[in-house]
Image: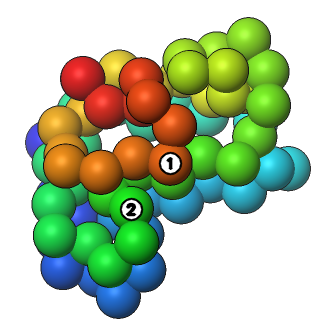
Amino acid sequence: MSKSLSNGRDGIRVDARSTGNMILGNLLFLNGEHDAHDDSLGFGRAGTANFWWMNIGGSESRPGLLG
């Protein structure tokens, strides 16, 4: 499990042009803006173009990225 803790902005941020990623099993807490942030659009998790699974955190840019 990877950890992203107490960053100034986002724990993990994926921009709109970054697609087809598998973001798995991360611990994301106490990051400045969001723990998990994905600006892509598609048919993946939470309407993104990426696969988010088994990530644990407190805040997200779209409901459904964490969990």
The reply to whether the C-beta atoms of the residues labelled 2 and 1 are less than 8 Å apart is yes
Q: Which part of the image, by quadrant, shows the N terminus?
A: top left
Q: What residue does disc 2 label?
A: 34
**Label 2 environment density (alpha carbons within 10 Å; few <14, some 14–19, many ≥20):** many
Q: Residue furthest bottom?
A: 8
User: Of callouts 2 and 1, which one flags the residue occurring earlier in the amino acid sequence?
Assistant: 2
Residue of label 1: 61
| Residue at screen point 70% across, 48% down | 39
Q: Residues within 10 Å of mark 1 (few under 14, many from 20)?
A: some
Q: Is residue 17 visible?
A: yes
Mark number for residue 18? none
Q: Residue at x 30, y 51 (%)?
A: 59
- Scheme by which the image is coloured: rainbow
The quarter of the rendered structure image containing the C terminus is: top left
Task: Answer above or below: position of 45 versus 50.
Answer: above
Residue at disc 1, secondary structure: loop
**Label 2 is placed on what type of residue?**
His
Kind of residue sitting beneath label 1: Ser
In the rendered image, residue 41, in percent from the top left (x then y), is placed at 79, 31
Where is residue 29 shown, x and y percent of the image?
16, 60
Q: Position of residue 6 (x, y in %)?
A: 18, 79
Q: Is residue 18 visible?
A: no
- Measure the C-alpha gap from mark 2 to mark 1: 6 Å
